[in-house]
Structures are given as structure tokens and as C-alpha cells.
Amino acid sequence: MLAEEVKPQLIEELTHALHKKKRSQPEVDFILKAFEFAYQKHLNQVRRSGDPYITHPVAVAKTLIELNCDKEAICGCLLHDVIEDTRASVDDLKELFGTTVAEIVDGVTKLNKLNFKSTEDAQANNFRKMLLAIAKDVRVVLVKLADRLHNMQTLHFLRPDKQQRIASETIDVFAPLANRFGLRNIQMELEDLCLKFLHPKAYSLIKDLVKSKKLDREAQIQKLKVVIKQILDNNGIEADIQGRAKHFYSIYIKLCQKGTDLNSNDEVVEIPIYDLLGIRILVSNVKDCYAALGVIHETFRPMPGRFKDYVALPKSNLYQSLHTTVIIPWDQKPLEVQIRSYQMHDVAENGIAAHWNYKDEEGVSQANPKEAEELKWLKQLVSWHTDVSEAKEYFSGVKNDVLGQEVYILTPKGDVIVLPVDSTPIDFAYKIHTRIGDTCTGAIVNEKMVSINYKLQNGDMVEIITNKNGHPNLSWLNFIKTHQAKYRIKSWYKKQNKDRHNTLGEQLFTEHFGKAEAEKILKSEELLKIAHKLNYKNIEDLLSAIGSGDQSITQIETKLQSKKLETVDHQIEKFKTRKAPAQGEGADIPELDGLLYTIAKCCMPIPGETVIGTISKGKGITIHRADCYNVKQAEQERVMHINWTNREVRTYPARLNIEVVDRIGVVKDILTLIADEGINIKDFKVTERPTTTTALLKVTIDVNGQEHLRKLSQKIYNISDVLQVERS
């Protein structure tokens, strides 16, 4: 199906969804303007399913329309891939749709154009950028989650290895992220889809068993609704009683916790009916929540240790509800009951992000005071970005401290502190303040002395004992839970050994670059800028990080090389440019029609790239890429700027460096893909790296321009075990 054929239908779907939510006509017009822009940019692109690409951003936008998000967020959905997959820029979006929309799109755009050491590095850097964008504007997470949801819904069109990778990333990161923002429905669908691809047998088994028990479950739920409604009416409590459907993933987790092996072929798993039952009671206010709880506990026998009060102690995503488990009297089976107000239910269903209040003026977004207070954890993201230079370390810390399961701890003043499960008093102390953590010598929990490795429980009241002469102990690293505490302890010890680390770092730096070159680099402005980008205050701190083993010299060397390439562009601007006279339209390079010129073999430029001509006697003009080393050696008077766009259907040689995991079959996969694309391979070499498990492939191919090469590079990068694709 062509994009032109589906366009009227997509416009109708968008318009209908917006009118259903009573959106104003100016909003509808603004959103349809974004649709038209995305449609034109994605016009010739298709998804793996064969559908026109524009169907994807429309599906993502419809998810946020259902959540009643503002027009900027919805436009962000429609435009979320145009920077990454087309020639549109952030500036283009700012000009047409405003700064807010442009920043939302930029926040969800992957960093594919950067050269990372591995796919793990790329994932960590992408995630870091996304979370920092979320901290700036929470709408970024809405677009990202809606995007991931539709990608999961269409995951069956990808190869099995990609299905596994994307599903694993989703269950580890994006489903917990949806939970963090209270987007319960998105979280549940993501988890069920992950189960389908990660554990297909368990998914099918649960699906069939749930279906087989549907009539029994519905009959039991109906009976319970009548009984509970009657007892609440008798006590003067107006309430709506709902059956609560459990999603497949929650059933899977519960059965796994009970030791049931859903992947075994030895026996047919049976799911007890009570594991599928759940009741939700909706009342008018908080007072009625507790009144209803009292009636339920008087009528049904509560199970000890199964009551949770998320009304008095809301979750960090603002979720509020009373949870209890009681015994059904007529069959002695447990029943899970949730009690909440209608307002609490609205937040639980749609999430805090859908209730964010935006200021339209000047594109500034702002939460109301209560929501801003409850989302303090977002500030941690900015704090960690400042403190932690390594993206993978940052990624690990966020997954553990922010996206994991939580316990709610009380200070002596009654303030609630949220920590990961299994946190200790040391974690609590560092969460309050670094100085309190550094000087912690003991803890009192619920008015009793406990050991500092005690695992805190929900509702514990904690008081930290400090000593001004105290200091952290490295043994704490063996039992503390939070990344924040671990980082602060390590920082304290690094600070004590800073002089030694600084000396060692300078020594390692000199050994790596050589004495003369090292002295030159250490005094350079470029190294200071690199230090700042790596979150170090100065070069001394950078050297200390090298000496302590926290910073790789190789990474610094890579950035210095990158700086040299940037300098080439600045030098080119200073060159005295000479325009070649255009004498016709028939040449490969129209500007040089009638002149003698050759394509440089050293850098193999292709149409679409920034190119520079160097003039030499007897040889005419030699065309180089702008970042070619030989351009820097040319005299200014012999350099000219050239605009090279391909106007003929012909090909040009281009070299690629491809870093791969050194496994059997990876070369075949790459060569097969290139052949399937109908591209001629001029040269191919494999350079093994004996000290690692990777190999470097050097391939020279024929392409018709920069865009052709970019698309091929992306397809090669998508092959399993391809770590990096670079222009040589």
C-alpha cells in the first residue's frame, strides 16, 4: 500500500480522535500541520511490515491523544523520527512548530550519528540523553513510551534476534519507566508483549489457561461484586465495584515466585482461579476509602502482612490506593482488593505525566506545586549527569535507584524517603545528605538500634547517628544498594588520594603521548574543553580520574582526534576560496565542467559530502573530502570550495570501516546484505584484533552518493553483532 493511498484514512483517524477528546480547531490545525510535514519527509520510506512509514508516527500520536496530552506532545509524536531518519533539522522544527516541539523531538532522537565503542555504549548514551530531556520536559517520556509501545506491537516483523534484544531492553527499562510515571496501561501492554517474545511458550500457556477459565472467573467476580456492593450500601458507603483483570505478565511473575516452571514440557501448568481474581472499589473521597477498608476487613478475614497503604504513603509516581488481601468465606481462597477514590483512579489509570500542567507562553512547561514536589526524583537525573562521567555507570545507577522496586522510609520529622528495595541505613543517610552519609556511625530504626547493613522495610522510621570525626568505610560497598551512596563513598576516598592519583595520571598521560606531545596537549584549550565535556572542572581533575582508573586515556585521544577534524572545517572557512566557472550541466561536477579534475584516492569523496578542491600544476584540481588530512597541508591560495551534487546516475568508490564481534558468519551476513542491495564490492579485508573478541572489516564499495552510503551504513549497523560502522 502506498503512502498516498493511506493518507486520507490517517487524517480521518487523527481528526476523529482529536474531536472525540473535544480538542479546539486551532489545536487540530496545528497537529495536522505536523502530520503533513512528517508525511512529506517520510513519503518514500516504509516499515519492515511493508506499511508506509507515516503509519508509525500516527499510531504513536493516537496513544497520546487518548491520554489527553497537549498539542506540543502530540506534534512531538508525529515528528519524532524526522531528525533521525530524514534531512529535517532541529532548526527546521523550531521555525515551523516552535522551540518546545523541537526540544521534545530532539529529546527522543537517538544518537546514531555518534561513534560509540559498542551497542551497549550507544544504548547508555541514548538513555542518558533521554532521561536528561525528561527532567527538562516530562512530555519527552510520553513520546518515547508511545513510540516504544507501537514498536513492540509490530515487533513480529523483525528478525528473532532483534525481537529478543528489543524486548529485553523494554522489560528492563521502558516498562519500569512507564510505571515510574504512572502510565499503568502502557506498562501492562509492554510487559505482556515482552513476555510474548521473551517467553513465547509461557505466554501461550497463560493465554490459553486464562481463556479457559474466563466463564468461571466472570461468574466469581459477579458474585463478589453483588456481595461487596450490598455490605457497603448497608454501611452507607456509595461505591462502584469493578472486576480487576490481571495482565499476563503479572500472572507469570506470580507463578514464577511460587516455583512454577512455565517452560517445562513435563507437565501441564494449572493456574488457580483465585490467582486471576481481583476487585477494585471506587469511592468519593479518602474518608470513604478507609471506611470501606474497615467494612471489608469486618466481613472478610484479612491475610496478615498483605495490607499496603499507598494513600498515606503515595508511590513516587503519585499512585494512591489501599491494597489488601482477604479470604473468600465460601471457598477459603484469597481475594486481592484495591480501594481508591475516583481522583486516585484517574491518576492510576492515566499517569502523572498526562496531568502535567503546561504554560504555553514562551514554550515553558511547568508542573503544579504538588506534582513538582512529588517528582523530586527527576532532579536526581540531573545531579547524576553532573557527577557521573561514564554513560554506562549512569545507566546502571538509574536502572537500580530510579526504575527498580521501592520501599518508603520515614524520617523522624515524618518526611517520606523513597529508596530501592534492600536499601540500608547507609543508603538512607546518603539520600538525606552527603555529609550525613560520610559521618554515619550507626542507625536507630523504629526506636531500636540496628546494624548499618540492616535491610529497611516499608514504613520504617530511621534516625542516623553521626560523628563529626567519622568517615566512610570501604566495606560498606559490600552491602549498600544505591548507586548514589556507592558513588559518594568512592568519591570520598578519591578525594583523599587526589594528589597521588594526579601524579599517576600525569605519568600515564606522558607515557601514552610522549613527553613533548603531552606537555603541548596539557596546556591546550582543547583538552580543557574535553575535560568540561566529561564533567571534570579542570585538567587536574581529569588527570586524577586517569590516575584512579575512572577515565580512559583512549577516550581522550579519540576526542582530541575529533577536535582536529573540527579544526579542519574552521580552517577551510579561512581559506581564500575560489569559485570555479560553471560551463555546463553535463559534467559529474557541474561547477568544474570544462576543467581538468580528479577524485582523490586518499579519502574517496562522494556526491553530497562537503568537498574541497586543491589546485596543482599539471594535474588540475583534485577533489578531497573536507576532513581529509591532505587538505590541511595545501596552501591557502591553492584551495577552492566546491558544491558537489550528483546529477548523473553513476557510482563512486567509498570505504567503510566495520567493527564486529568476531563470530563465524558475521562476514557472510554483511556481504550478503551488500549483495542483496545490488552494490558492487571493490575490495574487502578482515583485520583481526588478537587482544579482543572483535574484528575490523575494511570494505570498498560503489555508491551513488552520501545518502546512498548513509542508508547502507545504517542497514549494516542493524546486523546482529555489528558494533560500529564508520566512513574511512
Image (cartoon, rainbow, N blue to C red):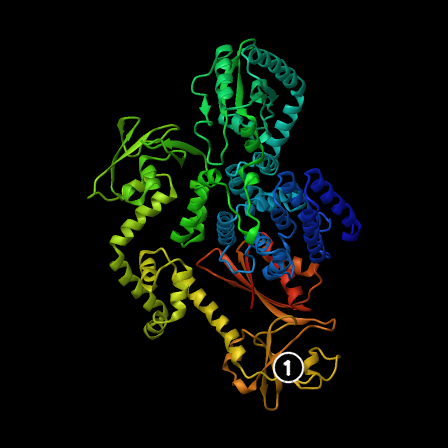
| Towards the viewer: 389 or 515 | 389
Residue found at the far bottom of this picture:
618
Q: Is residue 129 above or below residue 647?
A: above
Residue 721 visible in this rendered orientation of the protein:
no
What secondary structure is marked by label 1? strand
The image position of residue 595, as x and y in percent, is 68, 86
* Kind of residue sitting beneath label 1: Thr
| Towards the viewer: 88 or 197 | 88
Residue found at the far front of this picture:
361
Q: Is residue 255 above or below residue 613?
A: above
Assess disc 1: are there few (<14), some (14-19) or many (≥20) residues with their C-alpha within 10 Å of its C-alpha. few
Query: In the image, is 392 to the left or to the right of 212?
Result: left
The image position of residue 496, as x and y in percent, is 24, 53
Query: In the image, is 486 to the left or to the right of 620?
Result: left
The image position of residue 705, as x and y in percent, is 67, 69
Q: Is residue 699 above or below residue 104?
A: below
The image position of residue 255, as x and y in percent, is 53, 26
Residue found at the far top of this picture:
330
| Towards the viewer: 150 or 310 | 310
- Asked where in the image residue 637 lies, by quadrant, the reply is bottom right
Quarter holding the C terminus is: bottom right
Residue found at the far left of this picture:
469
- Asked where in the image residue 111 lies, by quadrant, the reply is bottom right
Q: Which residue is mark 1?
A: 598
Residue 235 visible in this rendered orientation of the protein:
yes
Which residue: 50% across, 26% down? 321
Which residue: 62% across, 17% down? 221
Query: In the image, is 549 to the left or to the right of 629?
Result: left
